[in-house]
Image (cartoon, grey):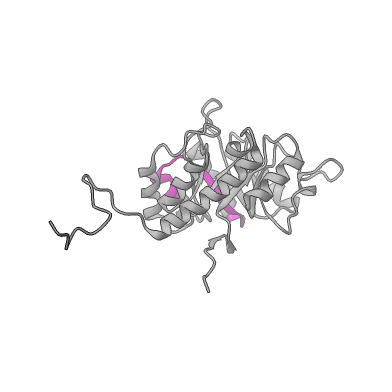
Amino acid sequence: MEMADTFELAGRSYTSRLIVGTGKYRDFAETKRAVEVSGAEIVTVAVRRVNITDTEKENLLDYLDPKRFTILPNTAGCYTADEAIRTCRLAREAGIGSLVKLEVIGDRKTLFPDVTATIEAARVLVSEGFAVLPYINDDPIAAKKLEEIGCAAVMPLAAPIGSGLGIRNPYNIKIILEHSRVPVIVDAGVGTASDAAVAMELGCDAVLMNTAIAGANDPILMAEAMRLGVEAGRKAFLAGRIAKKLYATASSPIEGLID
């Protein structure tokens, strides 16, 4: 019997390697449908932008059952370490849990992370018992520092948030993968299913995306495409691709042919 291909994150096993966000959809009903079709088991939520704490108002958790999905609160919209730390504490106090996506933005135009502030916040949050998934540049040094602090994973960007450019620097991602002893999750910049497949073919443990699905003409169909792209890329990685060669190699043996 074939064993399930799972990955471990903060002490839990997951079958789906696609993590999806919940922003930019037309409504919570569309969010729910897209998440279900994607097959994702981990769903990330911007604590500062989406209601998950006030039960008196429409609440995303009315549509996404925390017993079925791992809710991953994130600190989107935070521009300082202190803001990010407070946001994570708020999510834990609201009962969402201690698994958090740490995002400290350093520039409002590019939305690139402030790596120094991210490391500062990560150190505090890890010391307080949070399982931290930090969003960072595709920087192997930053990834190693965050791993040494005790982060549960590292999340290098593929390209700027919402750009849809795909993986701009696969070589840095490969270096991070080579040296990392925690899961590597590509986060931000995926545009279509082939981008997700490339991330998985490199050997990444998972891919996180939001805009690529929510911003598509048909978000539900794109959610399905992303699920299939992640699955195909993972299978290709496990199968092992052929080596690239400068010259052709015959598909059929030529030995024994009669002239």
Q: Residue at x 52, y 48 (%)?
A: 229
Quadrant of the image occupied by residue 47: top right
Find residue 218 and report its horizontal and vertical position in percent. Answer: 64, 36
User: In this orientation, which residue lies closer to the viewer: 159 or 133?
Assistant: 159
Q: Residue at x 51, y 28 (%)?
A: 110
What's the magenta region? 127-145
Q: Is residue 124 visible?
A: no
Find residue 36 and report its horizontal and vertical position in percent. Answer: 68, 50
Q: Residue at x 76, y 41 (%)?
A: 28
Q: Residue furthest top?
A: 109
Left or right of 178 on screen, residue 65? right
User: In this orientation, which residue lies closer to the viewer: 66 or 141?
Assistant: 66
Q: Is residue 182 visible?
A: yes
Find residue 202 and report its horizontal and vertical position in percent. Answer: 41, 50
Quadrant holding the C terminus:
bottom left
Left or right of 200 on screen, residue 24? right
Q: Residue at x 54, y 63 (%)?
A: 6
Say whether residue 29 is magenta: no
Left or right of 227 on screen, residue 177? left
Q: Residue furthest left?
A: 259
Q: Residue furthest right?
A: 56
User: In this orientation, which residue lies closer to the viewer: 54 or 3?
Assistant: 3
